[in-house]
């Protein structure tokens, strides 16, 4: 299986006569449509791509992502995604706790994509400023 996965992501460089594998999952998005474009691209990505180091490219901006752009991306994305006005979340238990909105119009896939994004952030060494109640963390730990 590992060889099959490597073959899927490998490309042959005819000049060098060797195969190479791109170690990055490149996410090219526009700042103005960050949430929509990110969710769309994450939805289309397969598990192998999501296990690669993330490389953020903001369309129309120069610069190489050496980690700072990725951190900025997750900061801006989490501000938009975990905003109580996004309809996903509720501040029912106070402004310091993020809880699920029972009147949410998103389907379960929306919450699954949020989980993938949180996982991507952690996988790429970025901590998000999100405060879930202890019940969520206990559930994640299987307690």
Image (cartoon, rainbow, N blue to C red):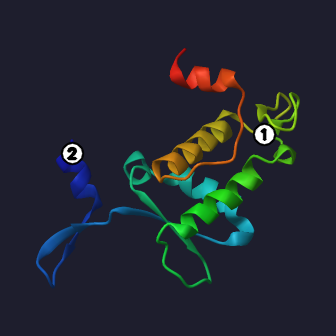
Q: Secondary structure at mark 1?
A: loop
Q: Is residue 115 above or below residue 18?
A: above
Q: Is residue 69 left or right of residue 10?
A: right
Counting from the top left corner in percent of width and height, residue 75 is at: 67, 58
Q: Secondary structure at mark 2?
A: helix
Q: Give whichever of 70, 108 is nearer the camera.
A: 70
Which residue sits at x=21%, y=49%?
A: 4
- Where is the C terminus found, in terms of image quarters? top right
Q: Give whichever of 30, 7 is nearer the camera.
A: 30
Q: Residues within 10 Å of mark 2 (few under 14, many from 20)?
A: few
Q: Which residue is mark 1?
A: 88
Q: Is residue 41 above or below residue 123?
A: below
Q: Give whichever of 129, 56 is nearer the camera.
A: 129
Counting from the top left corner in percent of width and height, residue 58 is at: 60, 74
Q: Residues within 10 Å of mark 1 (few under 14, many from 20)?
A: many
Which residue sits at x=67%, y=21%?
A: 135
Counting from the top left corner in percent of width and height, residue 73 is at: 62, 63
What mark, if any, has residue 2 been given in the picture? 2
Counting from the top left corner in percent of width and height, residue 116 is at: 55, 43
Q: Quadrant of residue 53?
A: bottom left
């Amino acid at each position: 299986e590992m060889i099959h996965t490597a073959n899927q992501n490998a490309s042959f460089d005819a000049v060098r006569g060797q195969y190479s594998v791109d170690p990055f999952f490149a996410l090219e998005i526009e700042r103005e449509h960050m949430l929509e474009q990110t969710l769309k691209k994450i939805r289309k990505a397969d598990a192998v791509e999501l296990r690669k180091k993330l490389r953020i490219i903001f369309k129309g901006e120069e610069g190489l992502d050496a980690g700072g752009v990725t951190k900025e991306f997750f900061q801006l994305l989490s501000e938009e995604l975990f905003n109580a006005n996004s309809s996903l979340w509720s501040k029912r238990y106070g402004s310091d706790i993020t809880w699920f909105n029972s009147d949410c119009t998103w389907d379960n896939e929306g919450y699954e994509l949020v989980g993938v994004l949180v996982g991507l952030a952690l996988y790429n060494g970025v901590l998000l400023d999100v405060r879930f109640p202890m019940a969520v963390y206990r559930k994640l730990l299987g307690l």
